Image (tube, rainbow, N blue to C red):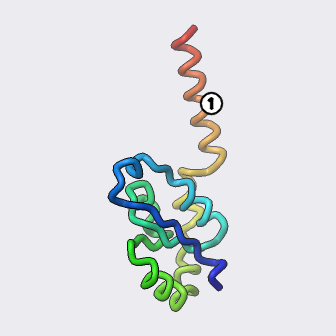
Amino acid sequence: MFSDITLIPSDSQDIFKAAASHNRVIDSIRGACIPIASPISSYRELSELCYLTNDFGKAVDHVSKNFKAYSLHSSLIREEKLKHFSPTSNKVKWIELISKLMQKTA
């Protein structure tokens, strides 16, 4: 069962983590896992799909005891909540950014 849970610890008090991306949590969610992660700002946007805490021991116990409910909830909202982070959407954003940069340098 623990292969269905990912642990993503981070120092939420570290100012450098304020710029951390969503990537690790998104990869975990896309892999149909329930992420247990430190409550850094980028992860808060996805709080409906992960368990944010600094108490990983308590969280592992809680999520493992309630895994079916977490899994069902995640499967119902995953696609909608991750739409903004889709590879297709990201590709379009990168192309737009590169195009704008090239126009400024031309």
Q: Does residue 45 appear left or right of residue 75 in this picture?
A: left
Quarter of the view holding residue 90: top right
Instruction: Tell me where residue 61 appears, x and y as whole percent.
Output: 49, 88
Q: Give me the residue at 40% from left, 61% from top.
A: 11
Instruction: Tell me where residue 59 appears, x and y as whole percent.
Output: 45, 81
Q: Is residue 102 above or below residue 71?
A: above
The amino acid pointed to by label 1 is Ile
Q: Give me the residue at 36% from left, 54% from top.
A: 14
Q: Is residue 71 above or below residue 52?
A: below
Instruction: Tell me where residue 9 appears, x and y as whole percent.
Output: 48, 66
Q: Give me the residue at 66% from left, 78% from top.
A: 3
Residue at the far bottom in the pictured view: 65
What residue did someone put label 1 on? Answer: 95
Q: Secondary structure at mark 1?
A: helix
Of the 4 image quadrants, the one containing the N terminus is bottom right
Q: Is residue 65 above or below residue 85?
A: below
Characterize the local packing of mark 1: few (<14), some (14-19) or many (20 or more) Cα atoms within 10 angstroms.
few
